[in-house]
């Protein structure tokens, strides 16, 4: 599933839309200089002072010496530039591996506005670099440096949501959540709350579409979008068993009857909560 395919395809919206660059960090720039040969020495006249002309009548070579930089200093500057380049190249070298926790778009630059050139499926091992910028991590795709959302990378391989079994037993705050829900919604809620104990706040019966009839539940994940995507994928994987009518997350909707279309973008409803940015909505038939 994606931030739908995290930003590029409408499976799930991006992280976060997340959210949602230059490929290389800037090299240390060497100062502009004009180099003149004075005897066996090498002189550098700093801009914007006038170029030194040691052949002019009355020129004082001792004055020229004040504009002169020793060869060791020049070597030092060159070494600084070389070290900077080496560090830049080092930052692009692989430093290890992480796992994608959701389907991820692969960008040419660390920006949601950059071209998407590839896709990493969920639970895939990714070769990462030391580069991080604007919430993105540099990854190696072949020999090329590319970028993915950092929030969807984990040190350990995530469990496949589809592999999680269904458990139907009361969870905490059962009475307040179950009040007014139809039996199918209670069943779906129990499946979610047992497999995702991290979620401690749910919304049930309310004066909103699908909630007003007791057919829908909201699982509040707030800023933990990785958790939200896992719950959404879990519900997708068990849609038939749970008799799911629809799932809404991060302004995208998925329905079993239009599953071939993936996650579809919804109109902006005016606020993060109304756009389901902080919770996963699921309803049953």
Image: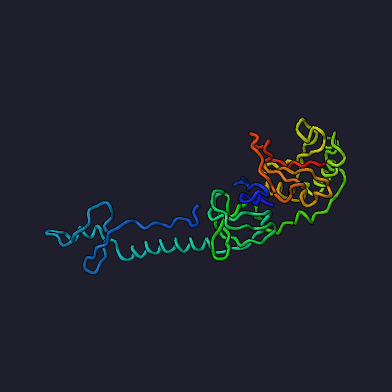
Give the residue at x 80% y 51%: 238
Residue 245 visible here = yes
Give the residue at x 69% y 41%: 222
Q: Quadrant of residue 207?
A: top right
Percent across and percent down for residue 260 are 72, 51
Nearer the observer, 257 or 279: 257
Q: Is residue 47 left or right of residue 143?
A: left
Give the residue at x 33% y 63%: 74
Q: Is residue 71 left or right of residue 196?
A: left
Residue 3 visible here = no
Percent across and percent down for residue 256 are 77, 47
Percent across and percent down for residue 226 are 68, 49
The residue at the far top in this view is: 207
Nearer the observer, 102 or 237: 237
Name the quarter where the C terminus is drawn. top right
Nearer the observer, 253 or 103: 253
- In the picture shown, does residue 53 fall above or below 234? below
- In the picture shown, does residue 25 fall above or below 13? below
Give the residue at x 79% y 43%: 245
């Amino acid at each position: 599933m994606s931030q739908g395919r995290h930003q590029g395809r409408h499976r799930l919206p991006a992280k976060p839309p997340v959210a949602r660059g230059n490929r290389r960090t800037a090299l240390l720039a060497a100062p502009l200089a004009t180099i003149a040969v004075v005897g066996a020495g090498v002189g550098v006249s700093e801009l914007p002072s006038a170029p030194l002309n040691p052949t002019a009548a009355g020129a004082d070579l001792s004055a020229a010496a004040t504009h002169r930089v020793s060869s060791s200093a020049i070597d030092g500057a060159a070494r600084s530039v070389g070290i900077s380049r080496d560090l830049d190249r080092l930052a692009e070298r692989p430093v290890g591996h992480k796992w994608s926790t959701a389907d991820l778009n692969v960008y040419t630059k660390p920006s949601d506005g950059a071209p998407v050139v590839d896709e990493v499926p969920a639970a895939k091992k990714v070769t990462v670099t030391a580069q991080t910028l604007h919430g993105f991590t540099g990854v190696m795709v072949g020999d090329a440096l590319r970028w993915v959302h950092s929030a969807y990378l984990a040190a350990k391989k995530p469990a496949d949501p589809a592999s999680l079994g269904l458990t139907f037993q009361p969870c905490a705050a059962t009475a307040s959540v179950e009040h007014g829900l139809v039996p199918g919604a209670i069943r779906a809620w129990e499946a979610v709350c047992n497999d995702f104990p991290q979620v401690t706040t749910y919304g049930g019966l309310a004066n909103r579409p699908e909630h007003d009839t007791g057919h829908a539940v909201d699982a509040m994940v707030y800023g933990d979008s990785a958790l939200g995507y896992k719950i959404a994928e879990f519900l997708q994987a068990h849609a038939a068993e749970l008799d799911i009518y629809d799932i809404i997350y991060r302004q995208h909707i998925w329905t079993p009857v239009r599953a071939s279309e993936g996650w579809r973008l919804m109109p902006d409803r005016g606020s993060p909560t109304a756009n389901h940015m902080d919770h996963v909505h699921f309803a049953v038939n």
